[in-house]
């Protein structure tokens, strides 16, 4: 099936969703500084790419945690559209993780559950402190206890019980599970 090129509205939706995830307007700032970089592709695959036909080495400075993220060859798959909603792809995790301000770090047992594709229920005080900065249905990057990015989750609050749920949107275990089902 052929997909049409991204419209300006779809590109703006991707940019807004990434800026919301990162907690800043860093992607907009990148586009202002580096006019060679743009969001391109189709509804099936949206990429952060170089407008020139050669390798590109750019340093992106993040004010949040003083890290530099190198964008090499600028062929980073950001995600895809399902109907009219943009979804992050697991391929974008290594690019977006160092730039995010809001993060949730899980202990070893919860990390394993998350990588196995399960939603996580949080009652731990340590994690609840991390989640206080989030709002209902906010998407965030989930990290293991070793600060390794493992996936994207959506925060939901249970009003009946004093617990918070992290809905697993996509995790690094998706490849293992898809390989197993291929045989």
Image (cartoon, helix red, strand yellow):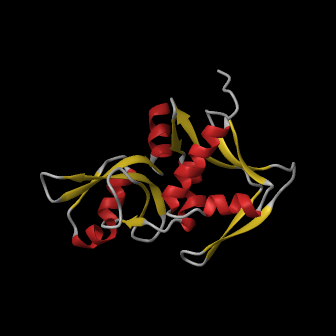
**So how many labels did they put on this image?**
0
Image quadrant of residue 128? Answer: bottom left
Q: Which of the pair 6/141 is nearer the observer?
A: 6
> Is residue 125 toward the left or the right of residue 146 in the image?
left
Find the residue positioned furthest to the bottom.
66
Find the residue positioned furthest to the left.
160
Quarter of the picture containing the N terminus is top right
Residue at screen point 56% across, 66% down: 99
Q: Is residue 22 above or below residue 126?
A: above
Q: Note whether residue 183 is visible.
A: no
> Is residue 169 toward the left or the right of residue 9 in the image?
left
User: Where residue 151 sits: x, y (%)?
Assistant: 46, 54
Residue at screen point 20% across, 63% down: 123
Q: Note whether residue 158 is visible.
A: yes
User: Where residue 52 sits: x, y (%)?
Assistant: 86, 50
Image quadrant of residue 135? Answer: bottom left
User: Where residue 57 sits: x, y (%)?
Assistant: 79, 64
Residue at screen point 54% across, 77% down: 65
Q: Which of the pair 134/48 is nearer the observer?
A: 134
Residue at screen point 58% across, 52% down: 92
Q: Is residue 183 above or below residue 104?
A: above
Find the residue positioned furthest to the top.
1
Q: Which of the pair 90/116 is nearer the observer?
A: 90
């Amino acid at each position: 099936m052929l997909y049409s090129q991204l419209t300006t509205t779809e590109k703006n939706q991707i940019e807004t969703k990434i800026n919301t995830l990162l907690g800043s307007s860093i992607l907009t700032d990148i586009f202002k500084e580096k006019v060679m970089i743009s969001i391109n592709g189709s509804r099936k695959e949206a990429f952060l790419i170089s407008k020139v036909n050669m390798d590109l080495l750019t340093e992106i400075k993040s004010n949040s945690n003083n890290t530099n993220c190198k964008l090499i060859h600028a062929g980073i798959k950001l995600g895809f559209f399902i109907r009219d909603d943009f979804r992050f792809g697991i391929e974008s995790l290594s690019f977006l993780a160092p730039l995010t301000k809001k993060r949730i770090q899980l202990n070893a047992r919860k990390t394993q559950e998350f990588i196995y594709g399960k939603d996580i229920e949080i009652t731990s005080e340590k994690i609840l402190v991390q989640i206080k900065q989030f709002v209902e249905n906010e998407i965030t990057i989930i990290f293991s206890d070793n600060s390794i990015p493992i996936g994207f989750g959506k925060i939901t609050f249970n009003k009946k019980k004093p617990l918070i749920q992290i809905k697993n949107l996509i995790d690094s275990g998706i490849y293992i599970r898809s390989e197993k089902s291929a045989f």
